[in-house]
Each structure stands twice: as structure tokens, then as C-alpha cells.
Image: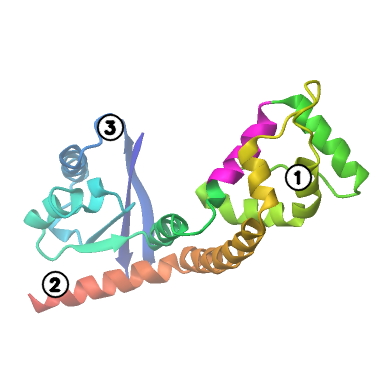
Amino acid sequence: MFPFIINYFTIQCGIVRSALEIVEQPRETAQNIVDTLRDLLKKHNLDIQKLTSIGADNTNTNYGRNHSVFTILQLEVVNLLKGNCFCHVLSNSVKVSHQHLPVDVETYLSQLYSHFNSSSKRIAELKEYFEFVEIEYLHIKIRWLSLYNSIDRLLKVYEPLSSYFCDINNDNADAITCPRAIKIFFSSNMSKCTLYFFHQILFDIQTKNLELQRYSNLRQLLIYTESSRVCSKN
């Protein structure tokens, strides 16, 4: 499913957001998207020359330099403005910067989740251990959009979780084994330092992300105003 959303401004109503149409678009190439957009605008009697800006995820298909939705539309709509998704920019900056940290936090969080998610016995063992140290058991799930929450939860239970894995005896064939990578992670002081560092950075990123979402209406108004100025000069 491919949604086309339009934002327009009127003196009476201010900024209005409306779903123009949701279409099936199996081939999501730049040219296919533009062709579909043209067809929809024509179907609804909307002039493509009145298009002031486009907003989409910051992928190469949408905003690539050579052949993208934006560059194709620019050939037809000269003063078209790029309405980047700044939340996506923040997310990408974290993803790229994360590669330069001394510890791959995302990978270890994924391994932690997989370790418990694949075995009900391991979950039971973990729950019993947490009851022993009187700390509440929490699930850890990993996605880039929820990475801050995952790290926040991990830090709250870091000490008992670290003890849990470090106390596992891999020589006991009948007991639950500890993956070597996870044991190395909890045995390193660098891991905890990196978690605290990343936790603070992600807190700032998430705060700004929420601000961007909260003031998205204002951003759209600014885009409209700037577009009007550009068009009036021509």
C-alpha cells in the first residue's frame, strides 16, 4: 500500500492535511512513484505546477542526486522544495555514528533478545533469577526507533543481568549455556560505559525527535510560506 498525503493552506482553515488516496504500488521505483503521483493529481483535477514541496523518507529513491522522485519532479516543477523528514535524519545520524562506538550496542541488544526469545526455559530461568535479587523482570526488544527504551531498560537491570550471565557455567551440559559474545559484553567495563554514553545521546535525540513531531504543523507552514515567497518572485 502506498499512501499519498497532501498538505495545503487556506486563510479560512489554515493548514489542512488530507489523504489523497492509498494505492497499490508493487514497483516503488522513482519513475513509478512519479507516474502514479501524476495520475492521482490528474484524477483529482489538481495542477502539478501548484506543487510547492514534497516530503518523504530520506531514501535514494525519494531524494537521490541522479534519478529520484525529487529530481524527476524538479524537471517539471522548477521551484520545488525538498521537505526532508528531519526525524529520519536524526535516526540516520545515530545509526551511522553508532558504527564508530567501541561497542556495537545494537548487535548485543539483538543477541540478548534472541537468546531469551528463542527459549521459554531461558525466560523462566531469568525470571527466577530476578525474583531472587528482587528486581523486576523486563523484556528487551530492539528496533532503531526504540533503541533508547531498550538501553534504558537494560541499564536498570544491568547488574543482576550481568551477574546472571557471568555466573552461568558453560561446562555444565545440563544447564543453560551463555553465548560467548554476551559473556564478553558483560565482562567488559567498556560495555557499560558505552551504554551510559549512548543512553544520554539517545535521550537528547529522542527529545528533539518528539519536538519535531510536535511542531510539524509549524514546519509545514514555514515550508508553505517560503514556497509562496519563491513563487511570488517569479
Mark 3, Cα crowd under 10 Å, few <14 / some 14-19 / many 20+, is: few
Q: Nearer the viewer, residue 205 or 12?
A: 205
Front label number (1 vs 3): 1
Separation of residues labelled 3 and 2 (CA atoms): 32 Å
Can you see residue 25? yes
Task: Estimate the x, y position of residue 106 in percent, counting from the top left.
Answer: 54, 48
User: Helix, strand, or loop for circle 2?
Assistant: helix
Pointer 3 residue: 25
User: Which residue shows up at 59% across the image and 66% down it?
Assistant: 197
Separation of residues labelled 1 and 3 (CA atoms): 40 Å
Left or right? Give the position of 75 relative to 194. left
Q: Nearer the viewer, residue 69 or 42?
A: 69
Q: Quadrant of residue 55?
A: bottom left
Specify the segment rendered in magenta: 107-118
Left or right? Give the position of 22 relative to 124. left
* Kind of residue sitting beneath label 3: Gln
Please, what is the dominant secondary structure of the magenta stretch?
helix
